Image (spheres, grey):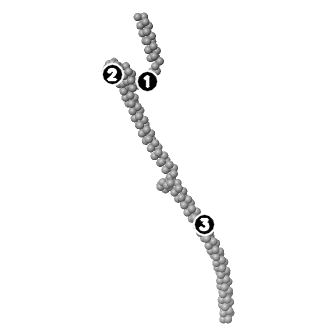
Amino acid sequence: MKFFKIAFIFIFTQSIIAQENLPEQPNTVENQFNELYKKSNNYQIYKVIKKNEYLRLQKSILDSIKVIKTDAASKQVKINEQQKSITELQTKIDTLNTDLATSIGKEDAISFIGIPLDKATYNTIVWGIIFALLAGLAFFIYRFNNSNVVTKETKSLLADTEEEFEQYKRKSIEKEQKLRRQLQDEINKQRGVN
């Protein structure tokens, strides 16, 4: 009997040591099914499972399913939040792109007489106006010089004409005086004869 006690203690301690040395496998559903299958008894071609083992496995599976559902629900909430955030960010990006396009359009456009024009058209119009004004200025300078030359010639002709007129007036006065003298001489002669 002592031998049986010693053998029992030896076998019991060996099984405990063996269990401690075995690497612990993760508590997955598949591992639990495998363990239940190993622990079940054989009855002809069937495996007999202990009721408490079955209930423990059922509880474990239901707990796992509950954890998975909770995890899936929390992940779905997180996905929904991220989707909402993505939608909000996309809306902001669209708004910023629209604002950017408007700003670029405003930067590239200049309002000229209330009409928005791009810079190239504005530059073309401004340079066209500048060249037109320069051409007008050149035309008026040319006209002024021509008019100035004509005016100087006209003044010169007027001065010559006035000089001639003054000479003509002097000659006319001299002729008139000469004619008056002759007339006076003739009158004096006629009086002297009578």
Q: Amino acid at mark 3?
A: Ile
Residue where numbered disc 3 is placed: 141
Label 2, secondary structure: give it.
strand
The reply to whether dot 1 and dot 3 touch (C-beta < 8 Å) is: no
Number of numbered tags placed on the structure image: 3
Which label number is shown at residue 164?
A: none
How crowded is the residue under tag 3: few (<14 C-alpha within 10 Å), some, or many (20+)? Answer: few
Q: Is residue 114 above or below residue 143?
A: above
Q: Amino acid at mark 2?
A: Lys
Residue where numbered disc 2 is placed: 47
The reply to whether dot 2 and dot 3 touch (C-beta < 8 Å) is: no
**Quadrant of the snapshot with the C terminus:** bottom right
The image quadrant that residue 129 belongs to is bottom right
Q: Is residue 84 left or right of residue 117?
A: left
Does label 1 or label 3 sit earlier along the sequence? 1
The image quadrant that residue 25 belongs to is top left
* Camera-side residue of 132 and 121: 121
Q: Is residue 4 above or below residue 60?
A: above
Question: Which residue shows up at 41% across the image and 7% down it?
Answer: 4
Q: Please provide percent x and percent y for residue 191.
A: 66, 92
Cα separation between marks 2 and 1? 24 Å
Q: Nearer the viewer, mark 2 or mark 3?
A: 2
* Camera-side residue of 43 and 179: 43
Which residue is situated farthest in the top direction here? 2
Residue where numbered disc 1 is placed: 26
Question: Which residue shows up at 47% across the image and 45% down it?
Answer: 97
How crowded is the residue under tag 1: few (<14 C-alpha within 10 Å), some, or many (20+)? Answer: few
Question: Which residue shows up at 37% across the image and 24% down it?
Answer: 33
* Camera-side residue of 173 and 84: 84
Q: Nearer the viewer, mark 2 or mark 1?
A: 2
